[in-house]
Amino acid sequence: MKTVHELLTEARAALPHRPSPSEAVRAQRTGALLIDLRSDDQRRHDGLIPGALVIPRNSLEWRCDPGSAWRHPSIHDYDQQLVLICDQGFQSSLAAANLQQLGLRRATDMDGGFVAYRAEGLPVASSHAPLRGKRSNAAARHWDAIYETRAPEQVSWYQARPETSLELVDALAVPHDAAVIDVGGGASLLAESLLQRGFSDVSVLDVSERALRHLTDRHGSADRRLHVIRHDLLSWTPQRRYDLWHDRAVLHFFQDPVERSRYVEVLEAALAPSATAIIGVFALDGPHQCSGLPVMRYGARQLAELLGDGFRLVDERREEHRTPGGALQPFIWAAFTRRNQNILPA
């Protein structure tokens, strides 16, 4: 039996040069990938390393193996230089040794970890994670204020019938007993349209209490097929798995890479094996703003790159949405299925 100190010594003996923080930053400028393994709480408290990928320790091997269906999109071959970073440089050494065994011969870790990085006075970016609660509250106030001053049929995203969404549900042959989640669905008519078609398990998640109240006032709260979840999407932890994820015009509000990465994490945590995701966002020639907020614009290829290799693009469509005020908003819709029967191990 070995002690943890013996394991650590063996792990470090198997690694190539362990760069100091300054050396790691210089290597990053020439193509090395810095991978931050620290916990959410540590990043919230101490901040982020600019340009570093954030990959949880419990999924590191699957994200870094170039042959894995769950590899991170930035990791594409076994010769990449990967520099792992934990808080003090101990856990990262053991993790890097595992990557060496996977054939990632240039995997190593930062000597001294984030503590040493900060001690050298290197740049630290403020994390959006500490603002998550504030962000959630601000988002709730923003959307509640809109529904306080406008009826659901007056908001710019209103659709009397969610045609494209229903067309994609039909094209994908989603069974009526599928567990469906409509994120950001609020007062949308999609949930009721699905229930009218015979779907038996439909959830709607939204940060706005007023939006969800419109839904329950219209449909009633006694229908056990309809589940209402008031929560900010990025701070939500799914309590179950869903067969279909539907998002019309939520993703495009997340401009920060940290928020987009969190979106994908929530998506993956919510979806069952072989599940389907339908995502509608402003197209590349779409508006730059919506409801007073800046937005990202996408093509189907950009959506596929964001979701990564664990998802396969199976359908894409363009929609010219006409707002109640008469403005034209081009949308791109993309449908994805999970590539494998197995989900990423927890």
Image (cartoon, rainbow, N blue to C red):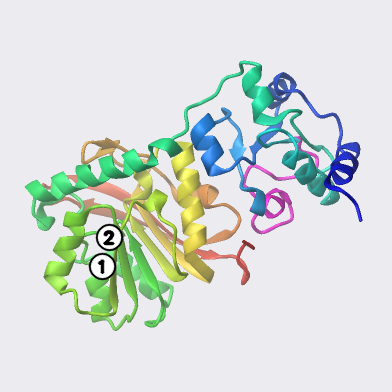
Which region of the structure is painted magenta?
59-81
- Residue 75 screen position, x and y as percent: 68, 44
Residue 318 in which image quadrant = bottom left
Query: In the rendering, at what x and y percent does residue 302 appear?
Result: 49, 46
Tag 1 secondary structure: helix
Q: Looking at the picture, does residue 162 appear above or below residue 93?
A: below
Q: Magenta residues: mostly which secondary structure?
A: loop
Check disc 2 and report the residue beneath it: 185
Going by the picture, which residue comes out furthest to the top? 121
Q: CA distance from mark 1 to mark 2?
A: 8 Å
Q: With respect to residue 101, does 295 lie above or below?
A: above
Q: Is residue 133 left or right of residue 187?
A: right
Task: Please give the name of the residue rendered at 21% of the width and 52% of the height, measured from the top-left corner.
Answer: 157
Front-lying residue, 257 or 122 = 122
Local crowd size for mark 1, using a 10 Å CA cut-off: few (<14), some (14–19), many (≥20): many
Does 113 sit left or right of 40 as displayed? right
Q: Quadrant of the N terminus?
A: bottom right
Residue kind at label 1, given as amino acid type:
Leu
Indicate which disc, 1 or 2, sits on the residue closer to the N terminus: 2
Do labels 1 and 2 touch, CB within 8 Å?
A: yes
In x, y percent, where is residue 282?
A: 33, 46
